[in-house]
Image (cartoon, rainbow, N blue to C red):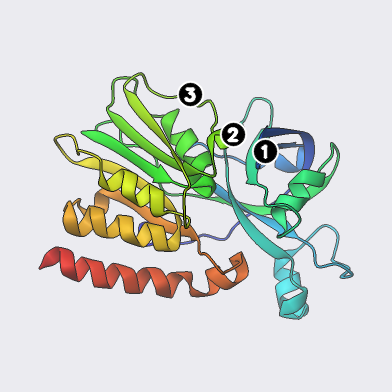
Amino acid sequence: MSDRPARRKAQLHQARVRRTEWLTPHMIRVVLGGEGLSAFTAGAFTDHYVKLLFPVEGVAYPRPLDMELIRAEFPRDQWPRTRTYTVRRWDADEGELTVDFVHHGDTGLAGPWAARARPGDEIAFLGPGGAYTPDPAADWHLLAGDEAALPAIAAALERIPDDARTHAFIEVAGPAEEQKLEAPDAAEITWVHRTGPVGHALVHAVSALSFPPGTPHAFVHGEAGCVKQLRHLLRVERQVPRERLSISGYWRVGHDEDGWQASKREWNQRVEEEQEGTAAS
C-alpha cells in the first residue's frame, strides 16, 4: 500500500488458541495467547495486521520455526503459506490477541483452520504491520469496506472521539452478518447488504453520501476492484488529498492471497498513477 512506511524485518511469534466464537454465520473470532506472545505489541495503529503461517502438509520444519532458515534452505513451494489478517484487538494485560476470520466453508486455508481451531492449537505468525489510525483532529471520518476490512473498521470506530462526525459503510452478505460495534455517539454506521458482485452496493452507497463540510480522513479497504472505484470517487471526483487517504485492496476476486500479493504492488501503483494524473488535471 502506498501510504505504508518502509518495511521492517517482521518478528515471528508462536501463539496458542485460547478460545473461539462464531460472531455471525460467516465470521469466526479466535483469541490467541501463550508465552510465545511475550514480545508481541500492538496499539499504535487500528489497521495492525499479522501474517499467519500455515505449514505445507508433509514438510518437516525446524523447531523452533525459523523463517530465515526455511527461506534459505527449503524450496519455495515448501515455505509455509502466509495469510494476512487484521489485529481486531490486542489486550496487553491479558496477553491476548484477537483475530476475526471470514469463513467461506471448506475453501481456503485460514477460514477452515479457524473453524476447526480448539484451545491449545498452535499457530505461528509474523508481525505486526500497520500504518493507519484515525486522526482525532480530522473534520470528519469516512470508513468503507467489506467483511475483510470489518475488523479494522471496528477497531477504528473504537478509537474515534465521541463527538467526531463519522460515516462508516460496511458491505456484508446480508442482515445475519451485521455485528454490534462500539462506535462514537456521532457515528452513522450503514450496513450495506450485497445484492450483486462484491463491492457494487458499497460503491453505490458511498457515492450517494452527501459529504459533510471539510476534509475527511478516510479508510477504504476491501476488494481491489471496488477500492479502485472508490479511490476514483475520492481522489478524482471529490479531490480528497492523497495524504488523507488510507486506501488499498485487501484482496481481489479470482485470486487467492498468494496470487494477489504477487501482483498487488504493480496493480496499486498502476491505479495510483492513472488516478493521480486525472486528479491533478
User: Which residue position holds label 1?
Assistant: 25
Alpha-carbon distance for marks 2 and 3? Answer: 18 Å
Disc 3 target residue: 182
Question: What residue sits right under mark 2 in the picture?
Answer: 176
Q: Amino acid at mark 3?
A: Glu
Residue 138 visible in rendering = no
The reply, left or right, for residue 97 in relation to residue 120 is left
Q: Quadrant of residue 265?
A: bottom left
Secondary structure beneath label 3:
loop
Q: Is residue 255 left or right of residue 142?
A: right
Q: Residue at x 34, y 26 (%)?
A: 187
Q: Nearer the viewer, mark 1 or mark 3?
A: 1
State how far apart marks 1 and 2 are (Cα): 7 Å
Is the N terminus in the top left, top right, bottom left or bottom right quadrant? bottom left
Task: From the top left corner, tell me how far across and down residue 143 is, in percent.
Answer: 37, 41
In front: mark 2 or mark 3? Answer: 2
Q: Is residue 119 visible?
A: yes
Q: Position of residue 175 (x, y in %)?
A: 54, 34
Q: How many marks?
A: 3
Choose top left, top right, bottom left or bottom right for residue 39.
Answer: top right
Confirm or deny contact between disc 1 and disc 2 (CB under 8 A). yes
Q: Position of residue 268 (x, y in %)?
A: 38, 68
Q: Amino acid at mark 2?
A: Ala
Is 123 located above or below residue 77 in the figure?
above
